[in-house]
Image (cartoon, rainbow, N blue to C red):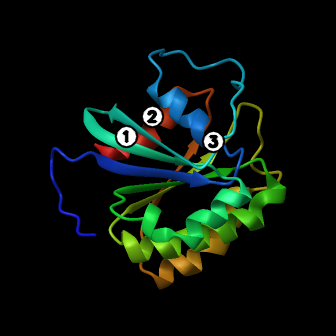
Amino acid sequence: MEYTENEDQPLKIVIMGMENAGKTTILNILTQESEEAPTKPPIMNPTKGVERNPITLFGKKTIVWDFGGQETYRNEYLANPEQYFHTIKFFYYVIDIQDYYRLIPSVMYFTGVFNKIQKYSPDAKLIFVFHKMDPGYDPNIKNLKVQFLDKVEPLLQEQFASYLMFNTTIFNLSSIKTAFYQIR
């Protein structure tokens, strides 16, 4: 599949991570009209498979591919990369910074996805979103951000991959907007 840059063609943005990392909630917060942050987490249903949503972000036409993070779907994406990983411009990988027990599966999943994206969309911009840095959360207790990066940086260095990273919480809208402002 050949891809040529075209101003009329929407940007393909992919948002991935483990289930319950907050991917869909981030997108809902990002696209809402309200300038007020929620006071409590919204009740969300898990994303099933991949949801493709055409939206305009910061004046750019985009198609956001929101990948459900349940194991069944993760295996499907990795088994059929040609269906999912072509023409990606921005690859957002969301890590639930409070979910210590999911750190190793998240690292493993990221590694598999990153290798596929390197093959099918080598120019995609990689952005880590360390999510759920909520008020009252103390990152010094179990610093999952540092632990995650310690595990994936050797792979990133081997591939000469650069990346950006952002700490986000739904309780601070600017944290989310700043992470997605990269698509300008």
Front label number (3 vs 2): 3
Residue 27 as seen in the image, left or right of residue 103 = left
The CA distance from mark 3 to mark 2 is: 21 Å
Asked whether the residues under the numbered discs 1 and 2 touch, taking CB atoms below 8 Å apart as contact, a structural biologist would say: yes
The CA distance from mark 1 to mark 2 is: 6 Å
Res 146 seen here: yes
Estimate the x, y position of residue 1 in percent, counting from the top left.
Answer: 28, 69
Res 161 seen here: no
Residue occupying the point 25% across, 32% down: 59
Please tell me which of labels 3 and 1 falls first in the chain. 3
Number of the label disc, if any, that sits on residue 181: 1
Residue 49 as seen in the image, left or right of residue 84 = right
Residue holding disc 3: 47
Front label number (3 vs 1): 3
The amino acid type found where label 3 is placed reads Thr
Number of the label disc, if any, that sits on residue 177: 2
